[in-house]
Amino acid sequence: MAATWPNTSSSSATRIASDPAPSTALERVEARLAERYTVLRRAFQLVELAPRPHGLWHSIRRKWATERKGVPVKDVAAAGGWRDTETLLTSYQQVDAETVRQVVLHPTSGS
């Protein structure tokens, strides 16, 4: 799926990033933001997610955390940079159809 970045012009980001070294604080901030949006745009392309307005990195982190549901939660939290497992579980790991299917078809034994 082709990802498009909402409300930004790639030509303005390219123009800002390719200009000579910024001379004012504002120009430095604009150049840094353009660089970050370029990296973020590429990240969305790599994980094949459509960017959401105001979503920034969160949707990528949600996808990453959700894909690791079968891994011990403390390990996922450590690898993903979460300080606690509660945030990972309540805000990032999402319900997905495949995991629900596995829960229904393959119950655990011993309870």
Image (cartoon, grey):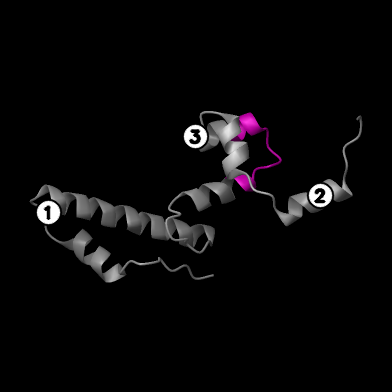
In the rendered image, residue 32, in percent from the top left (x then y), is placed at 24, 51
Q: Which residue is mark 2?
A: 102
Q: Which residue is mark 1?
A: 21
| Residue 9, above or below 38 | below
Q: Residues within 10 Å of mark 1 (few under 14, many from 20)?
A: few
The residue that appears at 31% across and 68% down in the rendered structure is: 10
Q: Which residue is mark 3?
A: 81
Q: Amino acid type of disc 3?
A: Gly
The residue that appears at 9% across and 50% down in the rendered structure is: 24
Mark 2 in CB contact with mark 3 (< 8 angstroms): no
Q: Is residue 109 left or right of residue 57?
A: right
* Sequence order check, earlier mark of 2 and 1: 1
Nearer the observer, disc 2 or disc 1? 2
Q: Secondary structure at mark 1?
A: loop
Tell me the distance, in whole angstroms, between the alpha carbons under discs 2 and 1. 54 Å
Q: Secondary structure at mark 2?
A: helix
In the rendered image, residue 90, in percent from the top left (x then y), is placed at 61, 39
Q: Nearer the viewer, residue 102 or 42?
A: 102
Q: Which residues are magenta?
A: 65-76
Quadrant of image for the C terminus: top right
Tell me the distance, in whole angstroms, between the alpha carbons under discs 3 and 1. 33 Å
Residue 8 is covered by the magenta coloring: no
* Sequence order check, earlier mark of 3 and 1: 1
In the rendered image, residue 54, in percent from the top left (x then y), is placed at 42, 56
